Image (spheres, rainbow, N blue to C red):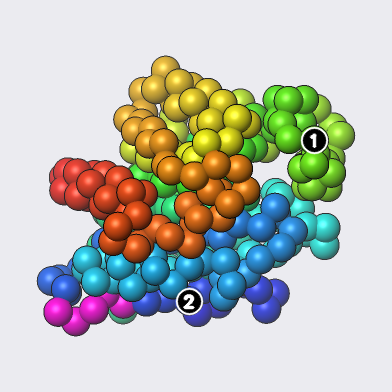
Amino acid sequence: MVYGSDPVQAIDFYEPLPAAQSGASPLIVFVHGGAWSMGSRENATGNAKIVHFTSKGIAFATIGYRLVPDSRVEDQASDVAHAIARLLAEAERLHIDRRRVILMGHSAGAHLVALVGTDPRWLDATGLSFAALRGVVAIDGAAYDVPEQLRAGAPLMRSLYRQAFGDDPERQQALSPLRQSNAPNAANWLLLHVDRPDGTRQTEALAAALRRAGSSVDVVALPGQGLSGHVASNRRLGIPDYPGTKAVDDWLDRVLATP
């Protein structure tokens, strides 16, 4: 499916396995990582997720979006919102339950789903609202507060953050989910992180801000450290014995069961 004129503005959609289907299906919309400047839906989604969630009766869509430096982070947030709108416009044909849509992302994708889940302007521009999202799953992001990440984050990553967010403090704050987390926000959140000082610190700060604003937030620490743990949190999600798989399954079972 396509949702824009750029070749990367496309969606791969996976139906639930026939044996798991029962009426309209919940939907996970996945946003890949890659430091806002790399990666694609083809190489940064992780096949285990697709197999696992479709076997549970959940439709799965992974989206492409325009990349820095040719496009801006603002364009990427807009792409995420427009991809959701495109899928929901096809809800009847795709047998999607519009009331049970989960937005999920890893790394830079975690930042983008958190931004779309906290700043209403992105969904508003498509005619949607936070009511379109049953919940948000952010997997090991570390740019929820961009100015703080630039100040205290890993030095080796700062050039990538500056390429994405520039030097304008107002722009950095506008693109920080934590700085946009005054109510309203998406109602339900699952924030996953591995043992990375900046990722852990940023995840806990975002969780506290969302809770203050009235959202329901679960935080789960995953095994693994540093970059290797960061990569594994994406690639292994969906593998039955990976702890993150059970954490997401348990959260989905609870959140998708509510009216």
Is residue 89 visible to the viewer in this orientation of the structure?
Answer: no
Tell me: residue 191, above or below residue 133: above
C-alpha distance separating marks 1 and 2: 35 Å
Label 1: which secondary element: helix
Residue depicted at 70% across the width and 54% down the height: 36
Label drawn at residue 155: 1
Left or right of 189: which side holds 160?
right
Q: Is residue 127 above or below residue 147?
A: below
Looking at the image, which is closer to me, 191 or 242?
242
- Residue 25, quarter of the rendered image: bottom left
Q: Which mark is residue 96?
A: none
What's the amino acid at mark 1? Pro
Tell me what residue is drawn at x 49 percent, y 26 percent. 204
Secondary structure predominantly adopted by residues drawn in magenta: loop
The percent coordinates of residue 31 (x first, y second) are: 53, 59
User: Residue 42 sits in which quadrant?
Assistant: bottom right
The magenta-colored residue range is 15-19
| Viewer-side residue, 244 vs 91 | 244
Direction from residue 257 to residue 193 in the image, left or right: right
Task: Tell me what residue is drawn at x 38 percent, y 36 percent.
Answer: 220
Q: Which residue is mark 2?
A: 12
In the rendered structure, the answer to whether residue 186 lies left or right of residue 96 reads right
Q: Amino acid at mark 2?
A: Asp
Quarter in which the C terminus is drawn: top left
Element type where label 2 sits in the image: strand
